[in-house]
Image: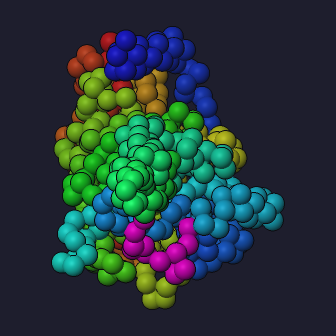
Amino acid sequence: MSTSFKRSSFLSLFFLFLFCFPGKAAVQELKQYSAAIHVHSTFSNGEHEVLELARFAKERNIDVLVLTDSFLTSVTYGIWPFDRIGIRGINKRVRLGVRDYGVGRYFEAVREAQRQFPDVVILPGVEVTPHYYWTGWPWTGLKLYAFDHHFLVLGLTEQQIENLPVIGNETWDNTEKRWTLILVPLVLFLAGILLLYLGSQEKIQVGKDTAVRMRRAWALGIAIMLFALLLAWNNYPFGKFGDPYSGRPDTVPAQGVIDYVRNQDGILYWSYPEAVYPDVLMGGGTMVSEPHSEDLLLTDGYHGFEGIYGNRITATRPGQVWDQILLRYIEGWRMTAPRVTTGIDFHYFKDPGGSWYDLNGGQTILLMAEKSEAAVLEALRKGSGYATFQEPAEGLRLYDFSVETLDGAKALQGGEVEGQSPVQVHIHLDWVKDPPANNQPFQLELVRNGEVVLKVKQFLPIEFTTTEELSSGPHYFRMRAAWPRKIYDVLSNPIFVNVP
Protein backbone atom coordinates (compact mmCIF):
# COMPACT_ATOMS: atom_id res chain seq x y z
CA MET A 1 0.00 0.00 0.00
CA SER A 2 1.47 3.40 -0.95
CA THR A 3 2.27 6.08 1.63
CA SER A 4 0.02 8.64 -0.09
CA PHE A 5 -2.91 6.17 -0.13
CA LYS A 6 -2.48 5.42 3.58
CA ARG A 7 -2.27 9.16 4.36
CA SER A 8 -5.40 9.86 2.29
CA SER A 9 -7.27 7.07 4.09
CA PHE A 10 -6.26 8.49 7.45
CA LEU A 11 -7.36 11.99 6.47
CA SER A 12 -10.71 10.65 5.27
CA LEU A 13 -11.33 9.01 8.65
CA PHE A 14 -10.17 12.16 10.44
CA PHE A 15 -12.47 14.38 8.39
CA LEU A 16 -15.37 11.92 8.88
CA PHE A 17 -14.87 12.16 12.64
CA LEU A 18 -14.92 15.96 12.52
CA PHE A 19 -17.97 15.92 10.24
CA CYS A 20 -19.90 13.64 12.57
CA PHE A 21 -18.84 15.50 15.72
CA PRO A 22 -18.24 19.11 14.64
CA GLY A 23 -18.97 20.57 18.06
CA LYS A 24 -16.19 18.59 19.68
CA ALA A 25 -13.58 20.10 17.35
CA ALA A 26 -14.83 23.64 17.93
CA VAL A 27 -15.10 23.84 21.72
CA GLN A 28 -11.49 23.21 22.75
CA GLU A 29 -10.04 26.31 24.38
CA LEU A 30 -6.45 27.07 23.37
CA LYS A 31 -4.24 29.79 24.80
CA GLN A 32 -1.34 31.55 23.10
CA TYR A 33 2.13 30.95 24.50
CA SER A 34 5.34 32.62 23.29
CA ALA A 35 8.32 30.46 22.35
CA ALA A 36 11.94 31.37 21.64
CA ILE A 37 13.12 28.70 19.19
CA HIS A 38 16.68 28.05 17.95
CA VAL A 39 18.77 29.18 20.92
CA HIS A 40 22.45 28.32 21.51
CA SER A 41 24.13 28.03 24.91
CA THR A 42 27.71 27.41 25.99
CA PHE A 43 27.20 23.77 25.00
CA SER A 44 28.02 24.94 21.48
CA ASN A 45 28.84 28.46 20.29
CA GLY A 46 26.51 30.50 22.49
CA GLU A 47 27.84 32.89 25.12
CA HIS A 48 25.36 32.13 27.93
CA GLU A 49 24.87 29.07 30.08
CA VAL A 50 21.55 27.25 30.12
CA LEU A 51 20.63 28.66 33.54
CA GLU A 52 21.27 32.20 32.33
CA LEU A 53 19.11 31.67 29.26
CA ALA A 54 16.29 30.34 31.41
CA ARG A 55 16.50 33.44 33.62
CA PHE A 56 16.53 35.73 30.55
CA ALA A 57 13.44 33.95 29.22
CA LYS A 58 11.56 34.39 32.49
CA GLU A 59 12.51 38.08 32.67
CA ARG A 60 11.15 38.58 29.14
CA ASN A 61 7.90 36.68 29.75
CA ILE A 62 8.84 33.90 27.35
CA ASP A 63 6.85 30.76 28.05
CA VAL A 64 8.93 28.25 26.08
CA LEU A 65 12.69 28.13 25.55
CA VAL A 66 13.84 25.72 22.82
CA LEU A 67 17.58 25.07 22.99
CA THR A 68 19.18 23.81 19.78
CA ASP A 69 22.89 23.61 20.46
CA SER A 70 25.11 22.34 17.65
CA PHE A 71 25.59 18.58 17.88
CA LEU A 72 28.84 18.43 15.88
CA THR A 73 31.07 21.32 14.91
CA SER A 74 33.93 19.66 13.05
CA VAL A 75 34.51 18.50 9.50
CA THR A 76 37.10 16.12 8.06
CA TYR A 77 38.99 16.12 4.80
CA GLY A 78 41.30 13.30 3.80
CA ILE A 79 43.04 11.90 0.73
CA TRP A 80 41.85 8.55 -0.65
CA PRO A 81 42.00 5.84 0.58
CA PHE A 82 42.24 7.44 4.03
CA ASP A 83 39.34 9.82 3.47
CA ARG A 84 38.25 9.85 7.10
CA ILE A 85 41.65 10.39 8.65
CA GLY A 86 42.27 13.94 7.60
CA ILE A 87 42.41 17.63 8.27
CA ARG A 88 40.03 19.12 10.80
CA GLY A 89 38.39 22.04 9.01
CA ILE A 90 37.00 23.56 12.20
CA ASN A 91 39.18 23.07 15.24
CA LYS A 92 37.41 21.43 18.19
CA ARG A 93 39.57 23.34 20.62
CA VAL A 94 38.00 26.56 19.33
CA ARG A 95 34.39 25.41 18.89
CA LEU A 96 32.88 22.42 20.67
CA GLY A 97 29.45 20.84 20.32
CA VAL A 98 26.99 18.83 22.38
CA ARG A 99 28.63 15.52 21.47
CA ASP A 100 32.00 16.83 22.67
CA TYR A 101 30.62 18.00 26.02
CA GLY A 102 28.37 14.96 26.39
CA VAL A 103 24.67 14.60 25.64
CA GLY A 104 23.98 13.45 29.21
CA ARG A 105 25.65 16.55 30.63
CA TYR A 106 23.60 18.75 28.26
CA PHE A 107 20.32 17.16 29.34
CA GLU A 108 21.22 17.43 33.01
CA ALA A 109 21.89 21.16 32.60
CA VAL A 110 18.43 21.56 31.06
CA ARG A 111 16.81 19.55 33.87
CA GLU A 112 18.53 21.74 36.47
CA ALA A 113 17.36 24.91 34.71
CA GLN A 114 13.84 23.50 34.55
CA ARG A 115 13.90 22.83 38.30
CA GLN A 116 14.96 26.41 39.03
CA PHE A 117 12.61 28.04 36.51
CA PRO A 118 9.42 25.94 36.47
CA ASP A 119 7.42 28.73 34.79
CA VAL A 120 9.46 28.34 31.58
CA VAL A 121 9.19 25.12 29.56
CA ILE A 122 12.77 24.31 28.49
CA LEU A 123 13.34 21.79 25.71
CA PRO A 124 16.76 20.28 24.92
CA GLY A 125 17.24 19.96 21.16
CA VAL A 126 20.19 19.87 18.79
CA GLU A 127 21.12 21.48 15.50
CA VAL A 128 22.66 18.98 13.10
CA THR A 129 24.25 18.93 9.66
CA PRO A 130 23.13 15.79 7.82
CA HIS A 131 25.77 16.01 5.08
CA TYR A 132 28.47 18.22 3.58
CA TYR A 133 30.75 17.94 0.57
CA TRP A 134 34.10 19.23 -0.63
CA THR A 135 35.32 20.60 -3.93
CA GLY A 136 38.88 21.42 -5.00
CA TRP A 137 42.19 20.16 -3.64
CA PRO A 138 44.39 21.16 -0.70
CA TRP A 139 47.02 22.59 -3.06
CA THR A 140 44.51 24.59 -5.16
CA GLY A 141 42.03 25.62 -2.48
CA LEU A 142 39.38 23.50 -0.76
CA LYS A 143 35.76 24.63 -0.56
CA LEU A 144 33.22 23.19 1.85
CA TYR A 145 29.53 23.22 0.90
CA ALA A 146 26.27 22.39 2.71
CA PHE A 147 27.82 22.48 6.19
CA ASP A 148 25.26 25.18 7.04
CA HIS A 149 22.28 23.11 5.84
CA HIS A 150 20.87 22.37 9.26
CA PHE A 151 18.06 20.51 10.99
CA LEU A 152 16.60 21.37 14.37
CA VAL A 153 15.83 18.10 16.17
CA LEU A 154 13.59 17.93 19.25
CA GLY A 155 11.79 15.36 21.34
CA LEU A 156 14.48 12.65 21.37
CA THR A 157 16.05 10.88 24.31
CA GLU A 158 19.75 11.14 25.15
CA GLN A 159 20.54 7.80 23.54
CA GLN A 160 18.53 8.62 20.42
CA ILE A 161 20.50 11.85 20.01
CA GLU A 162 23.80 10.04 20.49
CA ASN A 163 22.85 7.72 17.62
CA LEU A 164 21.76 10.44 15.19
CA PRO A 165 22.71 9.27 11.65
CA VAL A 166 24.60 12.39 10.59
CA ILE A 167 27.97 12.72 8.91
CA GLY A 168 30.77 12.56 11.46
CA ASN A 169 28.67 10.54 13.93
CA GLU A 170 28.95 7.12 12.27
CA THR A 171 28.71 4.32 14.83
CA TRP A 172 28.36 0.54 14.66
CA ASP A 173 24.68 0.80 15.62
CA ASN A 174 23.51 3.63 13.35
CA THR A 175 25.16 2.67 10.04
CA GLU A 176 24.21 0.19 7.37
CA LYS A 177 27.30 -1.89 6.69
CA ARG A 178 29.05 -1.60 3.33
CA TRP A 179 30.82 -4.91 2.94
CA THR A 180 33.45 -3.55 0.58
CA LEU A 181 34.67 -1.37 3.44
CA ILE A 182 35.13 -4.55 5.50
CA LEU A 183 36.36 -6.97 2.83
CA VAL A 184 39.12 -4.84 1.30
CA PRO A 185 41.17 -4.38 4.52
CA LEU A 186 40.40 -7.99 5.52
CA VAL A 187 41.70 -9.39 2.24
CA LEU A 188 44.79 -7.18 2.42
CA PHE A 189 45.50 -8.31 5.99
CA LEU A 190 45.22 -11.97 5.01
CA ALA A 191 47.52 -11.33 2.04
CA GLY A 192 50.08 -9.86 4.43
CA ILE A 193 49.90 -12.97 6.62
CA LEU A 194 50.41 -15.21 3.62
CA LEU A 195 53.51 -13.26 2.66
CA LEU A 196 54.91 -13.94 6.11
CA TYR A 197 54.60 -17.71 5.65
CA LEU A 198 55.05 -18.09 1.94
CA GLY A 199 58.08 -17.13 -0.03
CA SER A 200 60.33 -18.00 -2.94
CA GLN A 201 62.89 -20.80 -3.01
CA GLU A 202 66.52 -19.83 -3.37
CA LYS A 203 69.26 -22.37 -4.21
CA ILE A 204 72.51 -21.95 -2.33
CA GLN A 205 75.79 -23.76 -3.28
CA VAL A 206 77.51 -25.13 -0.20
CA GLY A 207 80.75 -26.78 -1.34
CA LYS A 208 79.75 -29.58 -3.69
CA ASP A 209 76.21 -29.64 -2.32
CA THR A 210 73.23 -27.48 -3.23
CA ALA A 211 70.87 -26.29 -0.48
CA VAL A 212 67.44 -24.71 -0.83
CA ARG A 213 66.47 -21.74 1.35
CA MET A 214 63.05 -20.11 1.63
CA ARG A 215 63.12 -16.34 1.27
CA ARG A 216 60.17 -14.84 3.13
CA ALA A 217 58.82 -11.36 2.37
CA TRP A 218 58.78 -10.20 5.99
CA ALA A 219 59.00 -6.50 5.27
CA LEU A 220 56.36 -6.50 2.53
CA GLY A 221 53.99 -8.69 4.56
CA ILE A 222 54.24 -6.50 7.64
CA ALA A 223 53.81 -3.34 5.52
CA ILE A 224 50.64 -4.72 3.90
CA MET A 225 49.24 -5.78 7.28
CA LEU A 226 49.87 -2.33 8.75
CA PHE A 227 48.27 -0.73 5.69
CA ALA A 228 45.23 -3.01 6.11
CA LEU A 229 44.89 -2.13 9.80
CA LEU A 230 45.10 1.59 9.02
CA LEU A 231 42.49 1.18 6.28
CA ALA A 232 40.19 -0.73 8.64
CA TRP A 233 40.54 2.06 11.21
CA ASN A 234 39.70 4.58 8.51
CA ASN A 235 36.66 2.59 7.32
CA TYR A 236 35.24 1.77 10.77
CA PRO A 237 32.30 1.40 11.47
CA PHE A 238 32.14 0.26 7.83
CA GLY A 239 29.22 2.48 6.86
CA LYS A 240 28.82 6.14 5.87
CA PHE A 241 26.17 8.79 5.37
CA GLY A 242 26.78 10.02 1.86
CA ASP A 243 30.04 10.81 0.10
CA PRO A 244 31.65 14.12 1.12
CA TYR A 245 34.00 13.87 -1.88
CA SER A 246 31.33 13.57 -4.58
CA GLY A 247 31.56 17.30 -5.34
CA ARG A 248 27.76 17.69 -5.46
CA PRO A 249 24.82 18.07 -3.06
CA ASP A 250 23.00 14.97 -1.85
CA THR A 251 19.63 14.91 -0.05
CA VAL A 252 19.69 11.16 0.60
CA PRO A 253 21.54 11.58 3.95
CA ALA A 254 19.09 14.34 4.90
CA GLN A 255 16.14 12.06 4.20
CA GLY A 256 17.80 9.39 6.29
CA VAL A 257 17.94 11.74 9.29
CA ILE A 258 14.30 12.74 8.76
CA ASP A 259 13.21 9.11 8.67
CA TYR A 260 15.24 8.30 11.80
CA VAL A 261 13.73 11.18 13.80
CA ARG A 262 10.18 10.33 12.74
CA ASN A 263 10.67 6.66 13.58
CA GLN A 264 11.77 7.75 17.07
CA ASP A 265 8.66 9.97 17.37
CA GLY A 266 10.85 13.08 17.39
CA ILE A 267 10.34 16.44 15.71
CA LEU A 268 12.46 17.87 12.92
CA TYR A 269 12.45 21.32 11.28
CA TRP A 270 14.67 22.61 8.49
CA SER A 271 16.65 25.62 9.74
CA TYR A 272 16.83 28.91 7.74
CA PRO A 273 16.72 27.33 4.24
CA GLU A 274 17.69 30.51 2.41
CA ALA A 275 20.09 32.22 4.78
CA VAL A 276 23.36 33.25 3.17
CA TYR A 277 26.50 34.11 5.11
CA PRO A 278 29.86 35.43 3.95
CA ASP A 279 32.44 32.80 3.06
CA VAL A 280 34.33 31.63 6.14
CA LEU A 281 38.05 30.94 5.98
CA MET A 282 38.99 28.01 8.20
CA GLY A 283 41.88 25.65 8.63
CA GLY A 284 42.26 23.77 5.38
CA GLY A 285 39.68 25.55 3.23
CA THR A 286 36.76 27.94 2.79
CA MET A 287 33.18 27.28 3.93
CA VAL A 288 30.68 28.49 1.33
CA SER A 289 27.08 29.31 2.25
CA GLU A 290 24.29 28.97 -0.34
CA PRO A 291 20.48 29.05 -0.13
CA HIS A 292 18.89 25.63 -0.44
CA SER A 293 15.10 26.01 -0.44
CA GLU A 294 14.92 23.26 -3.07
CA ASP A 295 15.78 20.80 -0.28
CA LEU A 296 12.33 21.46 1.14
CA LEU A 297 10.88 20.01 -2.05
CA LEU A 298 13.36 17.15 -2.37
CA THR A 299 12.75 15.78 1.13
CA ASP A 300 9.56 14.64 2.85
CA GLY A 301 8.40 13.65 6.30
CA TYR A 302 9.84 16.60 8.23
CA HIS A 303 7.55 18.69 10.40
CA GLY A 304 8.38 22.14 9.11
CA PHE A 305 10.95 24.85 8.55
CA GLU A 306 11.86 28.30 9.81
CA GLY A 307 9.57 30.61 7.84
CA ILE A 308 10.73 33.83 9.51
CA TYR A 309 14.34 34.59 10.44
CA GLY A 310 16.82 37.44 10.12
CA ASN A 311 17.49 37.04 6.42
CA ARG A 312 15.78 37.15 3.04
CA ILE A 313 13.34 34.32 2.29
CA THR A 314 11.33 33.64 -0.86
CA ALA A 315 9.98 30.15 -0.11
CA THR A 316 6.99 31.56 1.81
CA ARG A 317 5.88 33.94 -0.95
CA PRO A 318 2.58 33.03 -2.62
CA GLY A 319 3.04 30.31 -5.21
CA GLN A 320 6.65 29.58 -4.26
CA VAL A 321 8.27 26.55 -2.64
CA TRP A 322 6.04 26.32 0.45
CA ASP A 323 2.86 26.53 -1.59
CA GLN A 324 4.19 24.02 -4.10
CA ILE A 325 4.75 21.58 -1.24
CA LEU A 326 1.33 22.22 0.31
CA LEU A 327 -0.38 21.68 -3.04
CA ARG A 328 1.39 18.35 -3.48
CA TYR A 329 0.30 17.40 0.01
CA ILE A 330 -3.40 18.01 -0.55
CA GLU A 331 -3.13 16.20 -3.88
CA GLY A 332 -1.82 13.14 -2.03
CA TRP A 333 1.76 13.20 -3.35
CA ARG A 334 3.50 14.02 -0.07
CA MET A 335 3.43 12.42 3.36
CA THR A 336 3.48 15.62 5.41
CA ALA A 337 2.68 19.31 5.07
CA PRO A 338 5.45 21.42 6.61
CA ARG A 339 4.58 24.05 9.19
CA VAL A 340 6.56 27.20 10.04
CA THR A 341 8.26 28.69 13.07
CA THR A 342 10.40 31.76 13.72
CA GLY A 343 14.09 30.92 14.04
CA ILE A 344 16.12 33.43 16.03
CA ASP A 345 19.47 31.58 15.95
CA PHE A 346 20.33 33.30 19.21
CA HIS A 347 23.94 33.20 20.42
CA TYR A 348 24.37 36.40 22.43
CA PHE A 349 22.91 39.86 23.09
CA LYS A 350 24.16 42.68 20.93
CA ASP A 351 23.57 46.37 21.51
CA PRO A 352 22.85 47.98 19.17
CA GLY A 353 21.86 44.98 17.09
CA GLY A 354 18.10 45.04 16.68
CA SER A 355 15.52 42.62 17.96
CA TRP A 356 17.15 39.61 16.27
CA TYR A 357 19.75 39.83 19.03
CA ASP A 358 17.14 39.51 21.76
CA LEU A 359 15.25 36.45 22.91
CA ASN A 360 11.76 37.90 22.46
CA GLY A 361 12.01 39.72 19.13
CA GLY A 362 11.38 36.72 16.92
CA GLN A 363 8.68 34.61 18.56
CA THR A 364 6.78 31.49 17.63
CA ILE A 365 3.32 31.61 19.17
CA LEU A 366 2.03 28.18 20.13
CA LEU A 367 -1.67 27.41 20.61
CA MET A 368 -1.96 25.03 23.56
CA ALA A 369 -4.49 24.00 26.19
CA GLU A 370 -1.76 23.98 28.84
CA LYS A 371 1.86 24.98 29.28
CA SER A 372 3.80 21.72 29.45
CA GLU A 373 6.58 19.94 27.59
CA ALA A 374 4.14 17.45 26.07
CA ALA A 375 1.85 20.25 24.87
CA VAL A 376 4.78 22.14 23.30
CA LEU A 377 5.98 19.07 21.41
CA GLU A 378 2.45 18.34 20.19
CA ALA A 379 1.98 21.96 19.03
CA LEU A 380 5.26 21.86 17.10
CA ARG A 381 4.34 18.48 15.65
CA LYS A 382 0.98 19.74 14.36
CA GLY A 383 1.93 23.34 13.61
CA SER A 384 -0.58 24.73 16.11
CA GLY A 385 0.45 28.36 16.08
CA TYR A 386 2.20 30.95 13.95
CA ALA A 387 5.53 32.68 13.36
CA THR A 388 6.06 36.33 14.19
CA PHE A 389 8.72 39.00 14.41
CA GLN A 390 8.16 42.16 16.43
CA GLU A 391 9.70 44.83 18.56
CA PRO A 392 9.26 43.32 22.03
CA ALA A 393 7.92 46.53 23.62
CA GLU A 394 4.62 46.50 21.69
CA GLY A 395 3.92 42.85 20.98
CA LEU A 396 1.83 41.49 18.12
CA ARG A 397 -0.83 38.79 18.25
CA LEU A 398 -2.93 36.95 15.69
CA TYR A 399 -5.90 36.52 18.00
CA ASP A 400 -7.91 34.59 15.45
CA PHE A 401 -7.20 32.79 12.22
CA SER A 402 -9.71 30.04 11.66
CA VAL A 403 -11.90 28.48 9.00
CA GLU A 404 -15.54 27.55 9.63
CA THR A 405 -17.60 25.46 7.25
CA LEU A 406 -21.25 26.02 6.36
CA ASP A 407 -22.30 23.22 8.72
CA GLY A 408 -20.40 24.64 11.70
CA ALA A 409 -17.16 22.61 11.73
CA LYS A 410 -14.14 24.77 12.58
CA ALA A 411 -10.35 24.47 12.47
CA LEU A 412 -7.49 26.61 13.75
CA GLN A 413 -3.94 26.93 12.45
CA GLY A 414 -2.32 23.59 11.73
CA GLY A 415 -5.71 21.89 11.81
CA GLU A 416 -7.89 20.08 9.28
CA VAL A 417 -11.64 20.21 8.86
CA GLU A 418 -14.29 18.77 6.57
CA GLY A 419 -17.57 20.41 5.77
CA GLN A 420 -19.81 22.10 3.24
CA SER A 421 -19.00 25.21 1.20
CA PRO A 422 -19.05 28.18 1.42
CA VAL A 423 -16.61 28.57 4.30
CA GLN A 424 -15.92 31.57 6.48
CA VAL A 425 -12.35 32.67 7.20
CA HIS A 426 -11.99 34.65 10.43
CA ILE A 427 -8.97 36.93 10.98
CA HIS A 428 -8.16 39.16 13.95
CA LEU A 429 -4.72 40.78 14.27
CA ASP A 430 -3.84 43.46 16.82
CA TRP A 431 -1.20 44.91 19.11
CA VAL A 432 -0.82 43.47 22.58
CA LYS A 433 -0.19 46.97 23.93
CA ASP A 434 -0.20 50.40 22.29
CA PRO A 435 1.03 50.76 18.70
CA PRO A 436 4.60 52.03 18.15
CA ALA A 437 5.26 55.73 17.65
CA ASN A 438 6.11 55.19 13.97
CA ASN A 439 2.95 53.17 13.35
CA GLN A 440 2.38 52.01 9.77
CA PRO A 441 -0.40 50.10 7.99
CA PHE A 442 -0.06 46.34 7.63
CA GLN A 443 -0.26 44.60 4.27
CA LEU A 444 -2.26 41.41 4.78
CA GLU A 445 -2.54 38.62 2.20
CA LEU A 446 -4.88 35.65 2.43
CA VAL A 447 -3.61 32.72 0.36
CA ARG A 448 -5.76 29.82 -0.83
CA ASN A 449 -4.14 26.90 -2.65
CA GLY A 450 -1.07 28.96 -3.51
CA GLU A 451 -2.90 32.05 -4.82
CA VAL A 452 -3.68 35.35 -3.11
CA VAL A 453 -7.46 35.63 -2.83
CA LEU A 454 -7.65 38.72 -0.62
CA LYS A 455 -5.45 41.72 0.17
CA VAL A 456 -6.02 44.18 3.00
CA LYS A 457 -3.93 47.25 3.83
CA GLN A 458 -4.80 49.11 7.02
CA PHE A 459 -3.64 50.02 10.49
CA LEU A 460 -4.22 47.55 13.29
CA PRO A 461 -6.54 46.25 14.49
CA ILE A 462 -7.48 44.14 11.47
CA GLU A 463 -10.58 42.10 12.20
CA PHE A 464 -12.93 40.66 9.58
CA THR A 465 -14.64 37.57 8.23
CA THR A 466 -14.58 36.69 4.55
CA THR A 467 -16.70 34.07 2.80
CA GLU A 468 -15.05 31.75 0.28
CA GLU A 469 -16.78 29.43 -2.17
CA LEU A 470 -14.85 26.18 -2.51
CA SER A 471 -15.13 23.42 -5.06
CA SER A 472 -15.38 19.80 -4.01
CA GLY A 473 -12.03 18.44 -2.83
CA PRO A 474 -9.09 19.47 -0.59
CA HIS A 475 -8.01 23.09 -0.05
CA TYR A 476 -5.89 25.09 2.35
CA PHE A 477 -5.72 28.68 3.62
CA ARG A 478 -2.80 30.59 5.08
CA MET A 479 -2.09 34.27 5.68
CA ARG A 480 0.71 36.77 6.15
CA ALA A 481 0.63 40.33 7.47
CA ALA A 482 3.64 42.62 7.67
CA TRP A 483 4.97 46.14 7.51
CA PRO A 484 6.66 47.00 4.20
CA ARG A 485 10.16 46.27 5.59
CA LYS A 486 8.90 43.44 7.82
CA ILE A 487 9.91 45.08 11.09
CA TYR A 488 6.64 43.56 12.21
CA ASP A 489 5.69 40.31 10.55
CA VAL A 490 3.15 37.53 11.12
CA LEU A 491 3.11 34.28 9.14
CA SER A 492 0.35 31.78 9.88
CA ASN A 493 0.38 28.03 9.59
CA PRO A 494 -2.04 26.51 7.06
CA ILE A 495 -5.57 25.34 7.72
CA PHE A 496 -6.74 22.41 5.58
CA VAL A 497 -10.31 22.11 4.39
CA ASN A 498 -11.96 19.21 2.60
CA VAL A 499 -15.28 19.76 0.84
CA PRO A 500 -17.18 16.50 0.11
Residue 169 showing in the rendered view: yes
**Magenta region, residue range:** 85-97
Reply above or below: 376 against 247: above
Residue farthest front in this picture: 208
Residue at image location 53% in from the left, 33% down from the top: 263
Nearest to the observer: residue 93 or residue 85: 85
Q: Where does residue 24 sit, x and y in percent of width and height? A: 59, 21
Q: Quadrant of residue 102?
A: bottom right
Nearest to the observer: residue 464 or residue 282: 282
- Examine the structure image and report whether residue 95 is included in the region drawn in magenta: yes
Residue at image location 37% in from the left, 40% down from the top: 180
Is 476 on the left-hand or right-hand side of 354?
A: left
Q: Where does residue 354 sit, x and y in percent of width and height? A: 43, 80
Q: Where does residue 222 sit, x and y in percent of width and height? A: 46, 59
Is 18 on the left-hand or right-hand side of 453?
A: right
Is 289 on the left-hand or right-hand side of 162?
A: left
Name the main secondary structure of what is drawn in magenta. Answer: loop
Q: Where does residue 341 sit, x and y in percent of width and height? A: 44, 53
- Examine the structure image and report whether residue 284 is included in the region drawn in magenta: no
Residue at image location 27% in from the left, 64% down from the top: 134
Residue farthest bottom in this picture: 352
Nearest to the observer: residue 366 or residue 83: 83
Give the position of the C terminus as an image quadrant: top left
Residue at image location 37% in from the left, 12% down from the top: 1
Q: Quadrant of residue 53?
A: bottom right
State the scheme by which the image is colored: rainbow
